[in-house]
Image (cartoon, rainbow, N blue to C red):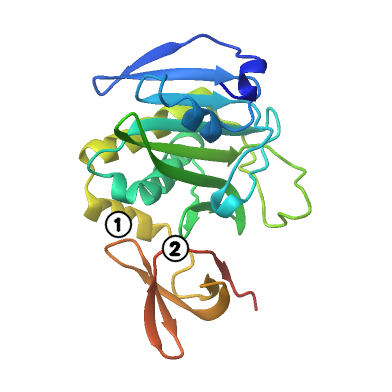
Amino acid sequence: MTSAARLVIIKRLVFAKVMDLNINILEFDSIDSTNTYARKNAGSLPLPSLIIAREQTAGRGRHGKSFYSPKGTGIYFTLLFEAGGGSEHITPAAAVAVCECIEESTGIHTDIKWVNDIYLGGRKIAGILCEKFESAGKTLIAAGIGINATTEAFPADIPLAGSLGVSPDPKETALKTAVKILEYDLRGDPVKLLGEYRSRMFILGKEIEYIKDGKIFKGKALDINPDFTLEIETGAGTESLSSGEISLIMR
């Protein structure tokens, strides 16, 4: 167990019957990171498990970045499950699932910035960290999601952070999102997912900066390819970006 073992677990284990699956739900008042907890306890947790926290003291984002997770103003959770047929595209699937659940719960339409940041009004209001790893002979995925619901004050080093402005029920939102992710992983349609993902991609047709091999380049975001890479127009032609960081060029 991690330092989370010394923190307060505010509820008991619950089993939610969804799609003939028992989703094991753990709720924490405070935890270091739901993804860290999922990975460190993967060998003893039933699959799938959903870890929900009111606060993360060491929330993690992509590329080693932290994710600001103050108590009571956000929705922070990780879905731990065994990888299935749709795991190759689980990150875009999680991004679409978050957008759909937000819209279903609040009526607010959100967009996606490639690869997996959720935006509203030009500000990032949610982040996703999907980690694939091996445990006890199984390939597992920890899909971590953080949504800023009503957070107002952010650290100075994340100036583009924003919030939904409303607070949907954390447990209901986490469970609905988890179900959508599992549905895709079990029997998802990559073509349909690509269409949903592309339709929310607000960077297409815009000038961007992107990091590749440690260097910064400029180009125009053209399209999302069938393999979910980002097609970019550069001065030398086009290229496909499979991972990395991008940002809009503001004029």
Query: What residue occupies the far top of the structure in this picture?
Result: 12
Query: What residue occupies the far front of the structure in this picture?
Result: 136
- Checking the image for residue 247, the label placed there is none
**Image position, residue 82 (x, y; %):** 31, 33
With 110 as the anchor, is 3 left or right in this view? right
**Image position, residue 37 (x, y; %):** 53, 28
**Closer to us: 118 or 82:** 82
- Viewer-side label of 2, 1: 2
Determine if residue 169 is in view: no
- Checking the image for residue 194, the label placed there is 1
Q: CA separation, marks 2 and 1?
A: 17 Å
Instruction: Give the secondary structure at mark 1.
Output: helix
Q: Earlier in the sequence, mark 2 or mark 1?
A: 1
- Checking the image for residue 243, the label placed there is 2
Location of residue 247 with respect to 167 vertically, above or below = below
- Position of the N terminus, as image quadrant, is top right
Instruction: Give the secondary structure at mark 2.
Output: loop
Location of residue 249 with respect to 88 vertically, above or below = below
